[in-house]
Image (cartoon, rainbow, N blue to C red):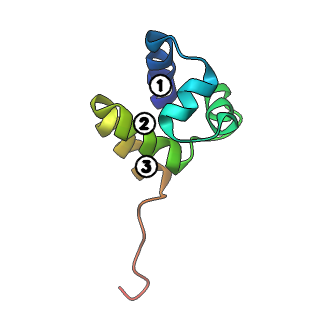
Amino acid sequence: MLIDKLKAKQQEMGLNDVQFADKLGVPRSTWRHAKVGIRRPSRKLVLGAMRQFPDLASLCVSFLLSDGTTVHKDSRA
């Protein structure tokens, strides 16, 4: 769902993959691999999307939480 929203943003803005990746602050290959489903979006890509597109912030946070990359369990608990 997040990637679909980002693809729509890219199309709305009329940007190619290099330009859109630059906007997100990631290498073109990172964006391209996420876009075509080769890899899950990286944390850096998601954070860049949140920064560039505040309207997608809640979706980005949900993605990060479901991915487990921002949740660290305290082993002392």
Residue occupying image coordinates x 42% and y 70%: 72
Q: Whole-percent x and y of residue 59?
A: 35, 36
Q: Nearer the viewer, residue 66 or 56?
A: 56
Q: Whole-percent x and y of residue 39?
A: 67, 40
Q: Whole-percent x and y of residue 77?
A: 35, 85
Q: Which residue is mark 1?
A: 6
- Tell which tag, 3 or 1, sits nearer the viewer: 1
Q: Which residue is mark 2?
A: 49
Q: Residues within 10 Å of mark 1 (few under 14, many from 20)?
A: some
Whichever of callouts 3 and 2 sits on the residue coming sooner in the sequence is 2
- Residue type at the position of mark 3: Leu
In contact (CB < 8 Å): disc 1 and disc 2? yes
Q: Residues within 10 Å of mark 3 (few under 14, many from 20)?
A: some
Q: Which residue is mark 3?
A: 64
Instruction: Tell which residue pokes out farthest to the bottom in this image.
Output: 76
Q: Nearer the viewer, residue 17 or 38?
A: 17
Q: Secondary structure at mark 3?
A: helix
Q: Quadrant of residue 18?
A: top right
Calculate the distance from the C-alpha at mark 3 to the C-alpha at mark 1: 15 Å
Q: Is residue 32 above or below residue 73?
A: above
- Residue type at the position of mark 2: Ala
- Residue type at the position of mark 1: Leu
Q: Whole-percent x and y of residue 56?
A: 33, 31
Residue occupying image coordinates x 39% and y 89%: 76
